[in-house]
Image: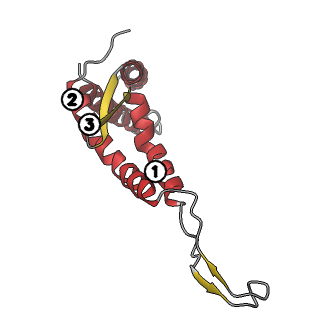
Amino acid sequence: MKIIEALKKVKELRLKQDGLILKIQQHSADLDFETPLYPDTKEQVAGWLQAVHDLSAEILKLRIAVQRTNLETIVAVEVQEGRFVKKSIAEWIHRRKDLANIDRLAWNGLTDRGLKEGNLSPTIAGGLGREVKIRRYFDPKERDSKIDMFRNEPSVIDRTLEVVNATTDLLAE
C-alpha cells in the first residue's frame, strides 16, 4: 500500500466510524412505548461499538505505518535551482508546516529599520554637521535570496511529497 492510499483509507475509515457513532447515538435508547427499529437493538448497538473499536485499531495501525515510513524514508528536495537537500519525509512535513516560514521571517527581519543616510544637523550631531551612512550587518543579496528560497520552500515540498506519497510503499512493522 502506498502512503497516499493509507491516508485515504484512514479518511474512509473515519467516515465509517462517524456513521456508526451516529447510529449508536440514535439507537442506544428509546422510550418504552416506541417500537425499536432493530429487533435485537442491544446486540446491534454492541456490534456498532465493537466495529468502531475495530476501525480505531485499523486506523492506528495505518497511522503508525505512515509515521514509520515518514521517519525512515529520505527524500531529496530541490530547495534552490540545482541545490538538493535530503531529509526524511517527517522532517520535510515539519519544514512545510511552519519552520520554513519561521526562517523566512527571521531573514525578513534584516532591514534598514527605516534609517536614512545623509547629513545630520549640528544640533543632532553634537554641534557639528556630520554625514552618516547606514551600517548593515547583513548582505542584502543573501537576505533576498534566502527570503525567496524560504517563501518558495513550502510549495516545492508539497510538489515533491505529492509524488513521494503516491510512489512510496508503507513500511511494515
Residue 71 percent location from the top left of the image = 42, 22
Distance CA(mark 1)–CA(mark 3): 18 Å
Task: List the single residue furthest toward the right.
Answer: 126
Residue type at the position of mark 2 = Ala
Mark 2 and mark 3 residues within 8 Å of each other at the beta carbon: no
Q: Quadrant of the N terminus?
A: top left
- Disc 1 target residue: 101
Q: Residues within 10 Å of mark 3 (few under 14, many from 20)?
A: some
Callout 2 environment at 10 Å: few (<14), some (14 to 19), or many (20+)?
Answer: few
The spot of residue 125 in percent (x, y) is 74, 84
Taking the spot 24% from the left edge, 27% from the top edge, the residue there is 5
Tell me, for residue 160, which label it has, or none. 3
The Cα atoms of the two marked residues, 1 and 2, are separated by 26 Å
Look at the image and tell me whether residue 37 can be seen. no
Extreme residue toward the top, this view: 173
Q: What is the image's colouring?
A: secondary structure
Q: Helix, strand or loop at disc 1?
A: helix
Label 2 belongs to which residue?
166
